[in-house]
Amino acid sequence: MLRPILAVLTLASAPAMAADVQVLDCDWQSNARNIVEPWEANTRTFSNGKTRIAALDTIEPAAGWAYVLVLSPPYDELGSRQCKVIGINGMGFAGMDFSQLQSSYDPNRGLSFTVPVAEYNFDTGAGVPRLLWFQLNQATGAILTDLR
């Protein structure tokens, strides 16, 4: 009787364990104190300064301290850019090499970015190297993501 219950619980929790890249509204993670120092090496601007991408280090949790900050159009009624953070599974990444951030632009799709990150593996206690891809549509504010 216990085995079927455990099997159901295991299957029910499986989607939560899958890698789920999330784009969140800015909250505590986006605090200026979390921008990785030196700032000039860990922030970059695009579209004549309208879009800024930055590396964030929230220190904790140790398994998910690294977030990507995205400040970009569209602007709100006060003239402020949208503010988003990109993380995984309800926290940040286990690592990020912001110096390897790559970008490209397609007028039909928007700005695209890739940056090496690490996804924490709770079974091994180590980060697994991955490539975070995200695409920003500055007209709508939509951000698509994928881990490769």
Image: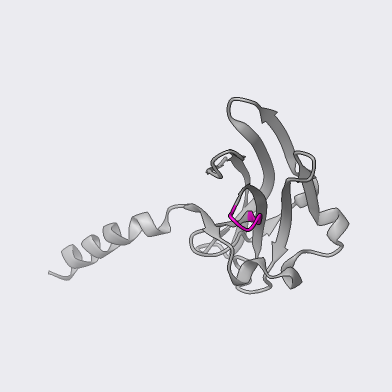
Q: Residue at x 75, y 65 (%)?
A: 35
Q: How is the image coloured?
A: one colour
Q: Residue furthest left?
A: 1
Residue at 36% in and 54% down: 15
Q: Residue furthest front?
A: 77
Residue 13 place in picture, x, y as percent: 33, 61
Q: Main secondary structure of the magenta part?
A: loop
Give the magenta-colored segment's residue range. 76-81
- Residue at 58 percent of width and 65 percent of height: 125
Q: Nearer the viewer, residue 147 or 11?
A: 147
From the viewer's perspective, is residue 61 above or below residue 44?
below
Q: How many marks?
A: 0
141 displayed left or right of 15: right
Q: Is residue 96 left or right of residue 43?
A: left
Residue 4 on image: x %, y %: 17, 63
Quarter containing the N terminus? bottom left
Where 73 sits versus 14, above or below?
A: above
Coordinates of residue 111 in the picture (x, y in percent): 66, 36
Q: Position of residue 41 (x, y in %)?
A: 86, 54
Magenta residue check for 33: no
